[in-house]
Amino acid sequence: MAATQRITAGAVIAAACAASLAGCAIGDNGSPHGAHGPRKAAPAPAPKSGVRLIGDGSTSYTGAQPHLPRPERLKPGQKPPQFVVFSFDGAGEDSQKLFSHFRKVSKANHANMTYFLSGVYMLPEDKRDLYKPPEHSPGSSDIGFNDEQGISDTVKQLRLAWLEGNEIGTHFNGHFCGKNGGVGEWSVAEWKSEIAQAKQFVKSWKTNSGMKKASPLPFDYDKELVGARTPCLEGQANFMKAASQLGFRYDTSGVNDQIWPKKKEGLWDLSMQLVPFPGHSYEQLTMDYNFMVNQSGTQTQGDPDKFDQWGDEMRDGLLKGFDRAYDGNRAPLVIGNHFESWNGGTYMRALDEVIEKVCNKPETRCVSFRQLADWLDAQDPGTLAKLRTLNVGEAPKPGWASFLTGRPAPAPKGVPGAPAVKQ
């Protein structure tokens, strides 16, 4: 998996008062003063959520996250909903403004998503030596660092995304892949160091960037951070050991078939999956980078005449995977992406179309990983064990009502075994 490109400075955007945790005293004419000149502002009302700043004020506690549905246990015989998780590696707002774009797409289609933040996107270039990556010299990073504008833009999107019900996970920091110090070689202790640093860069972005008057993020990252995807899907085994000891709840760094998940190392294994690849005899991982590699190789801008075709292949492959689960075993569909413009942005266009298509279907829930883990934890373990007996695309032969009750459903009238018909 290629590293997400380095964030560049974007346009200056002032956070709206409604999105800020600071109060705004607005006069009758829309200005900070009244229509007839300055006046004494009324005391700001106490925040309903009881805002409590944490540390240097980079983060804060504002109460329970809004717009989260309460997970409910399946009733006997009830068909499971079709869950779909859309997620983004190395989430940050740059000049492409794809973070803000997918926030809007999410809201328009009644979806929540997971954004895996790269910690170095909260660290300015001139403070790069604060990052001490395992097996690399201080200040090293394969995806660079950020600048003040990039940090400000990213913080705004993180704040709004969380307030809208989306999840903020982590994609760690320097995105080191392969041999010679890549994450696949890291020990459990080294993973713990990387995780601690990813948290610290989020918890101290105001100090490190010098933006001490900026509004804080509205969450406690120590509690918000419950899952991750490793760079290049490497190092999963030792990461899961470290994450389990640190209280994480899930991992999505592997490759699975479209079957119901189970726990490993005490974490829900919510790895991405293999889906049909239109025009090919093999299946494809549900990630934009992998579609690109199997279409244009490592060349991120291939033949422009094929851009539309390649995007359609990703879109149709994901839709085939969705339909296979929706009409079959109802296993959650897990999809991973980057904020990128590979092959003319065709994969982002394809993703827009998939979101619009699937998130508005009946019995479908487009959720974050955290929401999916909440739902799984609420279920009867016996029900989940039974769901895991269904193979890819396999619907229960006796029907859902019979399959999840543990007893045969009543036979229809007029067939052998049916109740006697009263005369």
Image (spheres, helix red, strand yellow):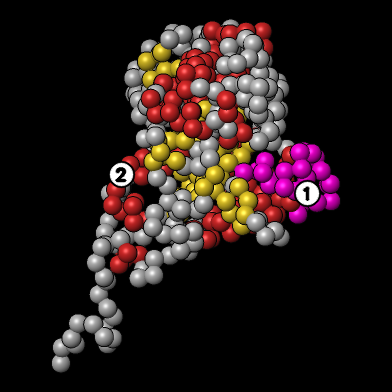
State the image quarter where residue 348 is shown.
Answer: top right
What residue is disc 2 on? 378
Name the residue: 72% across, 43% down: 293
| Label 2 environment density (alpha carbons within 10 Å; few <14, some 14–19, many ≥20) | some
Q: Residue at x 34, y 56 (%)?
A: 386
Horizontal side, residue 421 vs residue 89: left or right:
left
Q: Is residue 169 visible?
A: no
Q: Is residue 233 visible?
A: yes
* SS class, disc 1: helix
Q: Quadrant of residue 183?
A: top right
- Which of the 4 quarters of the picture holds residue 117? top right
In the rendered image, residue 380, in percent from the top left (x then y), is placed at 28, 49
Relative side of 422 to 360, left or right: left
Q: Quadrant of the C terminus?
A: bottom left
- Amino acid type of the residue that numbered disc 1 sits on in the rendered structure: Phe
Residues rendered magenta in the picture: 287-309
Q: Secondary structure at mark 2?
A: helix
Residue 197 in the image, given as x and y percentages of width and height: 51, 16
Q: Is residue 294 magenta-colored?
A: yes
Percent position of residue 328, x then y: 46, 63
Left or right of residue 188: residue 380: left
**Residue shown at the point (41%, 13%) measured from the top left:** 54
Depicted 227 relative to depicted 296: above or below:
above
Q: Nearer the viewer, residue 203 or 269?
A: 269
Determine the residue positioned at 72% across, 44% down: 292
Q: Which residue is mark 1?
A: 307
Q: How many discs appear? A: 2
